[in-house]
Amino acid sequence: MEDRKAFIVGISGASSSGKTTLARLLRDVFPNTFILHEDDFYKPETELPSKDGLLDWDCAEAISIPDMKRALEHIRAQGTFPPFVDSKEDQNSIGACPVPESAIAAAKAKVASWASPGQPGHSILFSSPSPSTSPESGSAQPKVRICILDGFLLYSPEMEAGGIPALLDAKLFLRVSRARATRRRERRDGYVTLEGFWTDPPGYVDKIVWPNYVASHAALFRGGDVEGALDEAVLREKGILAQVGEGVDVDMATTFEWAAETLMRELERWAATAGR
Protein backbone atom coordinates (compact mmCIF):
# COMPACT_ATOMS: atom_id res chain seq x y z
CA MET A 1 0.00 0.00 0.00
CA GLU A 2 1.27 3.44 -0.85
CA ASP A 3 2.72 5.22 2.19
CA ARG A 4 0.82 8.48 1.94
CA LYS A 5 1.69 11.51 4.02
CA ALA A 6 -1.05 13.83 2.77
CA PHE A 7 -4.68 13.96 1.70
CA ILE A 8 -5.07 16.46 -1.15
CA VAL A 9 -8.30 18.38 -1.68
CA GLY A 10 -8.93 20.26 -4.90
CA ILE A 11 -11.19 23.32 -4.90
CA SER A 12 -11.98 24.55 -8.38
CA GLY A 13 -14.41 26.86 -10.12
CA ALA A 14 -14.45 30.08 -12.07
CA SER A 15 -12.28 33.03 -11.15
CA SER A 16 -13.90 34.87 -8.21
CA SER A 17 -16.11 31.92 -7.25
CA GLY A 18 -14.76 31.92 -3.69
CA LYS A 19 -12.07 29.24 -3.95
CA THR A 20 -9.35 31.00 -1.98
CA THR A 21 -11.78 32.25 0.66
CA LEU A 22 -13.04 28.70 1.17
CA ALA A 23 -9.51 27.26 1.19
CA ARG A 24 -8.44 29.68 3.94
CA LEU A 25 -11.54 28.95 6.00
CA LEU A 26 -10.95 25.20 5.81
CA ARG A 27 -7.27 25.63 6.62
CA ASP A 28 -8.23 27.52 9.77
CA VAL A 29 -10.63 24.85 11.09
CA PHE A 30 -8.89 21.59 10.12
CA PRO A 31 -5.66 20.56 11.86
CA ASN A 32 -2.46 19.78 9.95
CA THR A 33 -3.61 21.79 6.92
CA PHE A 34 -1.85 24.00 4.36
CA ILE A 35 -2.75 25.54 1.00
CA LEU A 36 -1.17 25.20 -2.42
CA HIS A 37 -2.39 27.54 -5.15
CA GLU A 38 -2.66 26.83 -8.86
CA ASP A 39 -1.51 30.42 -9.35
CA ASP A 40 1.87 29.43 -7.85
CA PHE A 41 2.57 27.67 -11.15
CA TYR A 42 2.12 30.51 -13.61
CA LYS A 43 4.74 30.68 -16.30
CA PRO A 44 6.81 33.89 -16.64
CA GLU A 45 4.85 36.72 -18.23
CA THR A 46 7.07 36.53 -21.33
CA GLU A 47 5.79 32.98 -21.95
CA LEU A 48 2.08 33.70 -21.62
CA PRO A 49 -0.16 33.37 -24.66
CA SER A 50 -2.19 36.30 -25.98
CA LYS A 51 -5.82 36.51 -26.99
CA ASP A 52 -7.52 39.49 -28.63
CA GLY A 53 -4.36 41.50 -28.04
CA LEU A 54 -4.37 40.78 -24.28
CA LEU A 55 -2.16 38.55 -22.14
CA ASP A 56 -4.15 35.44 -21.28
CA TRP A 57 -3.60 34.46 -17.65
CA ASP A 58 -6.77 32.35 -17.58
CA CYS A 59 -5.89 29.39 -19.78
CA ALA A 60 -4.05 26.12 -19.23
CA GLU A 61 -1.19 27.27 -21.45
CA ALA A 62 -0.34 29.91 -18.82
CA ILE A 63 0.25 27.23 -16.17
CA SER A 64 3.25 24.93 -15.83
CA ILE A 65 1.30 21.71 -15.37
CA PRO A 66 4.45 19.52 -15.01
CA ASP A 67 5.65 21.71 -12.13
CA MET A 68 2.25 21.44 -10.45
CA LYS A 69 2.30 17.67 -10.81
CA ARG A 70 5.79 17.52 -9.32
CA ALA A 71 4.61 19.59 -6.34
CA LEU A 72 1.59 17.35 -5.74
CA GLU A 73 3.72 14.22 -5.91
CA HIS A 74 6.07 15.75 -3.34
CA ILE A 75 3.14 16.55 -1.04
CA ARG A 76 1.69 13.04 -1.30
CA ALA A 77 5.06 11.47 -0.48
CA GLN A 78 6.42 13.94 2.09
CA GLY A 79 3.39 15.71 3.56
CA THR A 80 5.13 19.08 3.40
CA PHE A 81 4.86 22.22 1.31
CA PRO A 82 7.22 21.82 -1.67
CA PRO A 83 10.45 23.70 -0.95
CA PHE A 84 10.86 24.45 -4.66
CA VAL A 85 7.56 26.40 -4.87
CA ASP A 86 7.73 30.16 -4.32
CA SER A 87 4.16 31.10 -3.43
CA LYS A 88 2.93 34.61 -4.22
CA GLU A 89 -0.80 33.99 -3.84
CA ASP A 90 -1.11 34.73 -0.12
CA GLN A 91 0.12 38.25 -0.88
CA ASN A 92 -3.15 38.88 -2.73
CA SER A 93 -6.09 40.35 -0.85
CA ILE A 94 -9.46 38.63 -1.09
CA GLY A 95 -11.38 41.16 0.98
CA ALA A 96 -13.35 40.72 4.20
CA CYS A 97 -14.46 37.22 5.14
CA PRO A 98 -18.17 36.81 4.28
CA VAL A 99 -18.75 34.09 6.89
CA PRO A 100 -19.88 35.16 10.39
CA GLU A 101 -17.48 34.49 13.25
CA SER A 102 -20.18 32.41 14.94
CA ALA A 103 -20.32 30.05 11.93
CA ILE A 104 -16.53 29.72 11.88
CA ALA A 105 -16.48 28.98 15.62
CA ALA A 106 -19.19 26.34 15.18
CA ALA A 107 -17.23 24.67 12.40
CA LYS A 108 -14.04 24.70 14.47
CA ALA A 109 -15.85 23.06 17.36
CA LYS A 110 -17.37 20.40 15.14
CA VAL A 111 -14.05 19.54 13.47
CA ALA A 112 -12.22 19.57 16.82
CA SER A 113 -14.74 17.08 18.21
CA TRP A 114 -14.43 14.88 15.11
CA ALA A 115 -10.61 14.93 15.42
CA SER A 116 -10.47 14.33 19.18
CA PRO A 117 -9.19 11.04 20.66
CA GLY A 118 -11.65 8.21 20.17
CA GLN A 119 -13.39 9.92 17.25
CA PRO A 120 -13.02 9.03 13.53
CA GLY A 121 -10.83 11.96 12.57
CA HIS A 122 -8.22 11.37 15.23
CA SER A 123 -7.07 8.00 13.94
CA ILE A 124 -6.92 9.42 10.39
CA LEU A 125 -4.94 12.57 11.13
CA PHE A 126 -2.84 11.66 14.17
CA SER A 127 -0.48 8.90 15.24
CA SER A 128 -1.22 7.22 18.52
CA PRO A 129 0.77 8.67 21.42
CA SER A 130 3.48 6.52 22.95
CA PRO A 131 2.44 4.28 25.86
CA SER A 132 4.23 6.60 28.29
CA THR A 133 2.23 9.62 27.13
CA SER A 134 -1.19 10.41 28.52
CA PRO A 135 -3.96 11.10 25.93
CA GLU A 136 -4.67 14.38 27.65
CA SER A 137 -1.19 15.73 27.02
CA GLY A 138 -2.04 16.70 23.45
CA SER A 139 1.23 15.25 22.16
CA ALA A 140 -0.24 13.11 19.38
CA GLN A 141 1.83 13.64 16.26
CA PRO A 142 0.41 14.41 12.81
CA LYS A 143 0.10 11.25 10.71
CA VAL A 144 -1.51 12.74 7.62
CA ARG A 145 -1.56 16.38 6.59
CA ILE A 146 -4.30 17.97 4.53
CA CYS A 147 -3.29 19.98 1.49
CA ILE A 148 -5.88 22.21 -0.14
CA LEU A 149 -5.16 23.02 -3.78
CA ASP A 150 -7.24 25.87 -5.15
CA GLY A 151 -7.33 26.70 -8.83
CA PHE A 152 -9.63 27.74 -11.64
CA LEU A 153 -8.67 24.93 -14.05
CA LEU A 154 -8.15 21.83 -11.92
CA TYR A 155 -10.73 19.66 -13.70
CA SER A 156 -10.16 20.96 -17.23
CA PRO A 157 -9.24 18.61 -20.09
CA GLU A 158 -5.68 19.98 -20.10
CA MET A 159 -5.24 19.23 -16.40
CA GLU A 160 -6.67 15.74 -16.92
CA ALA A 161 -4.15 15.16 -19.69
CA GLY A 162 -1.41 16.32 -17.33
CA GLY A 163 -2.48 13.90 -14.58
CA ILE A 164 -3.55 16.51 -12.03
CA PRO A 165 -7.06 15.27 -11.02
CA ALA A 166 -5.66 11.77 -10.49
CA LEU A 167 -3.48 13.16 -7.68
CA LEU A 168 -6.45 14.67 -5.82
CA ASP A 169 -8.23 12.70 -3.11
CA ALA A 170 -11.31 14.93 -3.04
CA LYS A 171 -12.51 17.30 -5.75
CA LEU A 172 -14.81 20.19 -4.81
CA PHE A 173 -16.35 22.46 -7.40
CA LEU A 174 -17.79 25.92 -6.72
CA ARG A 175 -20.30 27.69 -8.95
CA VAL A 176 -20.79 31.39 -9.60
CA SER A 177 -22.83 33.44 -12.04
CA ARG A 178 -21.19 35.57 -14.67
CA ALA A 179 -22.60 38.72 -13.06
CA ARG A 180 -21.27 37.94 -9.59
CA ALA A 181 -17.89 36.77 -10.88
CA THR A 182 -17.53 39.98 -12.87
CA ARG A 183 -18.42 42.18 -9.89
CA ARG A 184 -15.99 40.37 -7.60
CA ARG A 185 -13.13 40.37 -10.08
CA GLU A 186 -13.53 44.04 -10.93
CA ARG A 187 -13.40 44.95 -7.22
CA ARG A 188 -9.93 43.45 -6.87
CA ASP A 189 -6.92 45.75 -6.94
CA GLY A 190 -4.87 43.24 -8.93
CA TYR A 191 -2.54 40.28 -8.48
CA VAL A 192 1.04 39.80 -7.33
CA THR A 193 3.04 38.06 -10.08
CA LEU A 194 6.59 36.82 -10.58
CA GLU A 195 7.39 40.08 -12.36
CA GLY A 196 5.50 42.46 -10.11
CA PHE A 197 1.79 43.27 -10.19
CA TRP A 198 -1.00 42.66 -12.71
CA THR A 199 -4.18 44.70 -12.99
CA ASP A 200 -6.97 43.56 -15.30
CA PRO A 201 -7.41 45.91 -18.26
CA PRO A 202 -10.98 47.06 -19.06
CA GLY A 203 -13.19 44.27 -20.40
CA TYR A 204 -10.83 41.51 -19.32
CA VAL A 205 -13.54 39.33 -17.78
CA ASP A 206 -15.74 39.52 -20.88
CA LYS A 207 -12.90 38.97 -23.34
CA ILE A 208 -10.72 36.46 -21.51
CA VAL A 209 -11.85 35.18 -18.12
CA TRP A 210 -15.45 34.12 -18.72
CA PRO A 211 -15.07 32.70 -22.26
CA ASN A 212 -12.12 30.59 -21.07
CA TYR A 213 -14.11 29.32 -18.09
CA VAL A 214 -16.99 28.31 -20.35
CA ALA A 215 -14.68 26.52 -22.78
CA SER A 216 -12.98 24.52 -20.01
CA HIS A 217 -16.06 23.65 -17.95
CA ALA A 218 -19.06 23.37 -20.30
CA ALA A 219 -18.79 19.58 -20.19
CA LEU A 220 -19.71 19.59 -16.48
CA PHE A 221 -23.11 21.14 -17.20
CA ARG A 222 -26.23 19.96 -18.98
CA GLY A 223 -26.23 21.38 -22.47
CA GLY A 224 -22.95 23.19 -21.76
CA ASP A 225 -24.74 26.01 -19.92
CA VAL A 226 -22.38 26.97 -17.07
CA GLU A 227 -25.14 28.94 -15.35
CA GLY A 228 -27.60 26.06 -15.70
CA ALA A 229 -27.80 22.63 -14.09
CA LEU A 230 -24.75 20.51 -13.39
CA ASP A 231 -24.56 17.16 -15.18
CA GLU A 232 -24.64 14.76 -12.25
CA ALA A 233 -23.59 11.77 -14.37
CA VAL A 234 -20.44 13.58 -15.50
CA LEU A 235 -19.68 14.67 -11.94
CA ARG A 236 -19.96 11.06 -10.72
CA GLU A 237 -17.74 9.83 -13.54
CA LYS A 238 -15.05 12.38 -12.68
CA GLY A 239 -15.48 12.12 -8.91
CA ILE A 240 -16.31 15.82 -8.57
CA LEU A 241 -18.37 16.98 -5.59
CA ALA A 242 -20.60 20.05 -5.88
CA GLN A 243 -23.67 21.63 -4.30
CA VAL A 244 -26.06 20.11 -6.82
CA GLY A 245 -29.49 21.69 -6.88
CA GLU A 246 -28.48 24.64 -4.70
CA GLY A 247 -28.43 27.25 -7.46
CA VAL A 248 -25.58 29.13 -9.05
CA ASP A 249 -24.73 31.72 -6.35
CA VAL A 250 -24.66 29.91 -3.01
CA ASP A 251 -23.60 32.10 -0.08
CA MET A 252 -20.18 31.35 1.41
CA ALA A 253 -21.49 30.45 4.86
CA THR A 254 -23.58 27.64 3.34
CA THR A 255 -20.71 26.58 1.08
CA PHE A 256 -18.28 26.53 4.01
CA GLU A 257 -20.57 24.32 6.09
CA TRP A 258 -21.06 21.96 3.13
CA ALA A 259 -17.32 21.81 2.41
CA ALA A 260 -16.35 21.10 6.03
CA GLU A 261 -18.91 18.28 6.26
CA THR A 262 -17.81 16.92 2.88
CA LEU A 263 -14.15 16.98 3.82
CA MET A 264 -14.73 15.02 7.04
CA ARG A 265 -16.80 12.47 5.12
CA GLU A 266 -14.23 12.14 2.33
CA LEU A 267 -11.37 11.71 4.78
CA GLU A 268 -13.28 8.86 6.44
CA ARG A 269 -14.04 7.26 3.07
CA TRP A 270 -10.40 7.57 2.00
CA ALA A 271 -9.12 6.09 5.25
CA ALA A 272 -11.53 3.15 5.01
CA THR A 273 -10.53 2.47 1.39
CA ALA A 274 -6.81 2.69 2.20
CA GLY A 275 -7.19 0.56 5.32
CA ARG A 276 -5.66 3.26 7.49
Image (cartoon, rainbow, N blue to C red):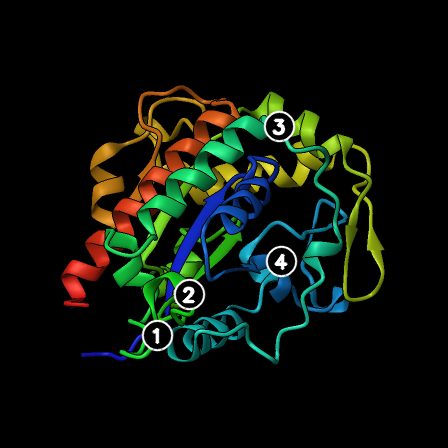
Q: Residue at x 31, y 78 (%)?
A: 130
Q: CA distance from mark 3 to mark 2?
A: 35 Å
Q: CA distance from mark 2 to mark 4?
A: 39 Å
Q: Do callouts 2 and 1 mark residues in contact (Cβ within 8 Å)? A: yes
Q: Nearer the viewer, mark 3 or mark 1?
A: 1
Mark 4 residue crowding within 10 angstroms, few (<14) / some (14–19) / many (20+)? many
Residue under pointer 3: 98
Counting residues from the start of the chain, the first of labels 4 and 1 encountered is 4
Taking 210 as reference, is 31 above or below it? below
- Mark 1, residue position: 133
Comes first in the chain, label 3 or label 1: 3
Type of amino acid under label 1: Thr
Element type at mark 1: loop
Select label 2 or label 4 by which is in front: 2
Q: Residue at x 52, y 34 (%)?
A: 104
Query: Of circles 3 and 2, which is in front?
Result: 2
Residue 112 showing in the rendered view: yes
Closer-to-camera residue (244/141)? 141
Give me the C-alpha separation between circle 4 and circle 3.
22 Å
Q: Is residue 117 above or below residue 178?
A: below
Q: Which residue is at 43% across, 59% downward?
A: 158
Secondary structure found at label 2: helix
Residue type marked 2: Ser
> Residue 148: horizontal and vertical position, in percent?
47, 56
Label 4 vs label 3, nearer the camera: 3
Pointer 2: what residue? 137
Amino acid on which disc 3 is placed: Pro
Specify few, some or many for label 2: CA neighbours under 10 Å numbering under 14, 14-19, or 20 or more: few
Residue 39 is tagged as 4
Quadrant in the picture for the N terminus: bottom left
